[in-house]
């Protein structure tokens, strides 16, 4: 016997043995009678054994056929188990994506992104983990997250998609560019209007979490000047930052979409000379970019953000006013 019998031939062997005729077996197997006969002939030739006695009344098993019948059942069962296990493994491997998120869901278009993956042919199951921008990148680097959102100052010229950050090599897909404004108490107008970054370093600033984009962005501006700003109070909620500023104790960064939500009378001023432009990007480890589930995630982002080569980055979406906590 040169090769192992094919599953189809074994099914024909089992069915003919049970039914006693080729015609009934063919009907149950949805095959023609010549096709079933051909399978039996091939099985006998490959084994070198006669498996059936052909009589006017039908087919009966030979001694060899009776001995091989239980093994044929086991082979078919093993084939079915193999297929079931393979399908299960494929489903588990393709169906899970761990995503690190930041900011508010409307701003980063999180809903359309998750919906796109969940309703795709692969029906990817998405697990979300909120955190600070730097924490998200660190968890991607350690393998605790597959992909995530990241905020950084817009590079002055380079638009390379691959970047080295904190010792890791990451693939970044820019989604949009947006500004951070500096806001100050209304009575500090003369301290911030017409002023540049060096003029603002000695003023008190609102403290944000160590791994937040706010803190990193400000430190990157002020550290080359030889000092870091004095920080007072603390908040990890973007809209609460406006409340601190309006209380008259500090400056803070704020996104336009947050400022646009403020419908009450404003008790703060926006510095007119300084702006910090940032990129919101979608990130993964460069070494994992080829993985199927991560590649699908980047493709979904491209559709959700309508990204095309050479296009300008989309403008941020202004979401309805909400007082919920927002992490950066």
Image (cartoon, helix red, strand yellow):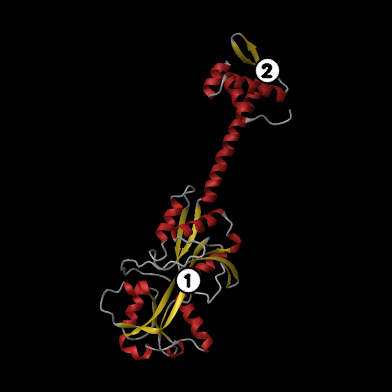
> Does dot 1 land on a helix, a strand or a loop?
strand
| Residue nearest the observer in this picture, 313 or 139 | 313
The residue that label 2 is drawn on is 63
Q: Residue at x 26, y 76 (%)?
A: 264
Q: Quadrant of residue 5?
A: top right
Q: Residue at x 52, y 55 (%)?
A: 296
CB atoms of marks 1 and 2 within 8 Å: no
| Residue nearest the observer in this picture, 320 or 21 | 320
Q: Is residue 140 visible?
A: yes
Q: Earlier in the sequence, mark 1 or mark 2?
A: 2
Q: Quadrant of residue 255?
A: bottom left
**Which residue is outermost to the left?**
265
- Quadrant for the N terminus in the image: top right
Q: From what the image shows, is residue 202 above or below residue 277?
A: below
Residue 193, how many percent across, how many down?
Answer: 37, 88
Q: From what the image shows, is residue 47 above or below residue 326?
A: above
Instruction: Report the side of 164 relative to 153 (left or right).
Output: right
Residue 77, how many percent across, how many down?
Answer: 58, 32
Residue 233, how many percent across, how many down?
Answer: 38, 82
Q: Residue at x 71, y 22 (%)?
A: 45
The residue that label 1 is drawn on is 279
| Residue nearest the observer in this picture, 202 or 15 | 202
- Quadrant for the C terminus in the image: bottom left
Residue 73, how many percent across, how many down?
Answer: 60, 28
């Amino acid at each position: 016997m040169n090769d192992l019998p094919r599953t189809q031939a074994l099914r024909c062997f089992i069915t003919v043995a049970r039914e006693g005729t080729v015609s009934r077996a063919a009907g149950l197997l949805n095959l023609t009678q010549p096709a079933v006969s051909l399978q039996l002939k091939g099985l006998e030739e490959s084994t070198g054994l006669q498996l059936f006695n052909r009589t006017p009344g039908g087919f009966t098993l030979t001694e060899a056929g009776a001995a091989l019948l239980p093994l044929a059942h086991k082979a078919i069962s093993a084939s079915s188990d193999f297929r079931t296990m393979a399908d299960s493994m494929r489903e588990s491997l393709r169906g899970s994506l761990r995503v690190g998120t930041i900011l508010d869901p409307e701003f980063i278009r999180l809903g359309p992104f998750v919906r796109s993956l969940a309703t795709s042919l692969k029906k990817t199951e998405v697990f979300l983990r909120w955190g600070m921008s730097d924490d998200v990148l660190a968890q991607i680097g350690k393998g605790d997250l597959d992909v995530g959102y990241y905020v950084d100052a817009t590079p002055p010229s380079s638009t390379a998609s691959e970047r080295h950050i904190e010792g890791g090599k990451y693939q970044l897909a820019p989604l949009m560019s947006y500004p951070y404004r500096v806001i100050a108490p209304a009575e500090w107008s003369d301290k911030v209007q017409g002023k540049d970054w060096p003029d603002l370093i000695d003023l008190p600033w609102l403290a944000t979490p160590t791994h937040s984009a706010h803190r990193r962005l400000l430190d990157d501006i002020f550290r080359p000047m030889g000092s870091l700003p004095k920080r007072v109070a603390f908040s990890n909620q973007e809209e609460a930052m406006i409340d601190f500023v309006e209380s008259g104790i500090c400056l803070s960064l704020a996104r336009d979409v947050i400022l646009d939500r403020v419908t009450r009378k404003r008790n703060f001023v926006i510095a007119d000379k300084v702006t910090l432009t940032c990129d919101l990007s979608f990130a993964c480890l460069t070494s994992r970019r080829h993985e199927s589930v991560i590649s699908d995630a980047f493709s979904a982002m491209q559709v959700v953000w309508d990204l095309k080569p050479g296009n300008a980055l989309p403008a941020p979406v202004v979401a309805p006013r909400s007082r919920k906590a927002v992490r950066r």
